[in-house]
Amino acid sequence: MFATLPSATADQTAFPVANLVILIVVAAILYPLQKKLREVVSRRRRERWAEEERLTGHQPEPGDRPAPDDEQS
């Protein structure tokens, strides 16, 4: 009725190529989306910080925040 662990793994001797292809396709789709999302969030955060500083009149110290072109990858 239920497959035991030794009998279930006996049929699979190698990593199926189909699973590798699926993994590559998923990574090829998700990585650019994640990268774009990080860029958008960073840009909005910098815009929000600039607006808050403009409204409060606060001038940040040079070491308060990273430079806009100093993106982390």
Image: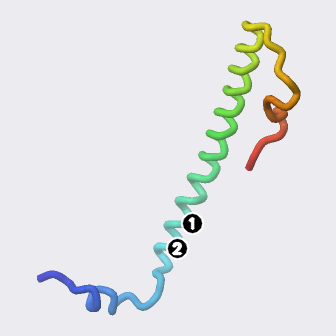
Three-letter code, disc 2: Leu
Quadrant of res 8: bottom left
Identify which residue is drawn at 68% across, 27% down: 45
Return the residue at label 2.
20
Return the residue at label 1.
24
Q: Secondary structure at mark 2?
A: helix
Disc 1 to disc 2: CB gap under 8 Å? yes
Q: Nearer the viewer, residue 60 or 34?
A: 60
The tag on residue 35 is none
Report whether 5 appears left or right of 37.
Answer: left
User: In the image, residue 52 lies at what x, y percent?
Assistant: 71, 14
User: Where, quadrant-wise, is the N terminus in this rendering?
Assistant: bottom left
The residues bearing labels 1 and 2 have C-alpha atoms spaced at a distance of 6 Å
Please rate how many residues cluster around mark 2, counting C-alpha atoms within 10 Å: few if below 14, some from 14 to 19, many from 20. few
User: In the image, residue 67 lies at what x, y percent?
Assistant: 84, 33
User: In the image, residue 46 lies at what x, y percent?
Assistant: 73, 26
32 in relation to 61, above or below: below
Q: Nearer the viewer, residue 64 or 46?
A: 64
Identify which residue is drawn at 33% across, 92% down: 10
Identify which residue is drawn at 88% across, 28% down: 62
Q: Secondary structure at mark 1?
A: helix
18 in relation to 47, above or below: below
